[in-house]
Image (cartoon, rainbow, N blue to C red):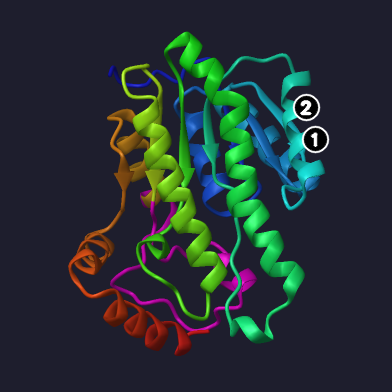
Amino acid sequence: MKAVDYRNRWVLITGASSGLGAEFARALAARGANLVLTARSAERLEQLALDLGRVNGVLTRVVVADLASAEGVRALLAGVDALAVHVEHVVSNAGFGAAGRFLESDAETQTAMVRVNCEAVVAIARHFVPAFAKLRSGGILHVASTAAYQPTPYMASYGASKAFVMSFSLALREELAGTGVRVVTLCPGPVPTGFQRVAGVDKPLPKLAVLQAPAVVEAALHAYDRNHAVCVPGTMNSVQTSAVRFLPRAVVSKAARWALRSRA
C-alpha cells in the first residue's frame, strides 16, 4: 500500500477530548488532516478543535456523544453523517478501564466498559468500513492495549475487552485483505494520560514500560502508514507481549494477578 496522505482528508477520532485521542488529533492535524472529534466533553472538544484549526489551518468538526449506550453510539453515527463530510480514516480510541476486585466492583461501570470498549468499536467499524471497502481506500486504527495479550486479574473486564478489540481487528483485517482498506491495532502499554486515575490505578507506573503519549501516537501512525497488523510501542512492551505467547496460560495469569494486585 502507498503511504497515507492525510492532507485535506477527514479523520474521525473517538475519545478525542484527552489522552491518546487528543494526541492523535494533534499529530493528524499537523499532517494536514481535517478532523471530526468526538467524546463526552463538549467544552474540551470545542477548545481542541479551535486550537488545531487555528494552528494547523485544518477544518474541524465536533460531535458530542456518550458511547456507553446504544443510543449514544447511534447519536454519534447520525451526527457524523449529518456533517456531510467524507470520513476516510477512523481512529477508534474511546475506551476506559476500572481496577479492583470484580466481586466488589460497580456493575454498571463494568457493563458500560464493555459497551464502550467493545460494542461501540464494532458499531463504528460496521458503519464506516463498508464505504472504505467500496472505494478500496481508507481504514481504521483500533486502540487496544498490551492487556489484550493475557488475562488481567483485578482488571478482568478491561483486559477481556481489549482482547476482543485485537481479535476483532485481526479478523476484520483478514476479511478485508486485498481491498485496499487498512485495519491496524495499537496495543500500548502504560501511558501517563489520566487513564490510570479514571481506572483507579494509583500506584506509580513501571518506568521501563512507560512511553509518553506523543511517542505512542507516532509509532501508531508509522504502523498505520505501513499497514502493519499490530503495533506494540516500546521495547519492553514488545518483549513482554512476545514472551506471554510461549508461557503456559496458568503461569501468565498468576503473574498478572501478582502484578495488578500490587497496583490496583
Indicate whether 215 appears above or below 169.
below
Give the magenta-colored segment's residue range: 187-215
Quadrant in which the N terminus is drawn: top left
Query: In the rendering, at what x and y percent does residue 92 appear?
Result: 55, 41
The crowding category of the residue bearing disc 2, from other C-alpha atoms within 10 Å (few below 14, some 14 to 19, many at least 20), is few
Q: Is residue 163 magenta?
A: no
Task: Give the numbered dot on residue 78.
Answer: 2
Q: In the displayed image of the protein, which residue is found farthest to the top?
A: 135
Query: In the rendering, at what x and y percent does residue 128 appear?
Result: 58, 25
Indicate whether 226 appears above or below 114.
above
- The residue located at (42%, 66%) in the rendering is 190
Q: Which residue corresponds to mark 1?
A: 75
Q: Is residue 104 visible?
A: yes
Identity of the amino acid at label 1? Answer: Ala
Secondary structure predominantly adopted by residues drawn in magenta: loop
The crowding category of the residue bearing disc 1, from other C-alpha atoms within 10 Å (few below 14, some 14 to 19, many at least 20), is some
- The residue located at (57%, 65%) in the rendering is 195
Judging depth in this view, the residue of 8 and 239 nearest the camera is 239
- The residue located at (48%, 53%) in the rendering is 164
Judging depth in this view, the residue of 143 and 112 nearest the camera is 112
Identity of the amino acid at label 2? Answer: Ala
Q: Are marks 1 and 2 in contact (CB under 8 Å)?
A: yes
| SS assignment at label 1 | helix
CA gap between label 1 and label 2 equals 5 Å
Query: In the rendering, at what x and y percent does residue 134 appear?
Result: 49, 11
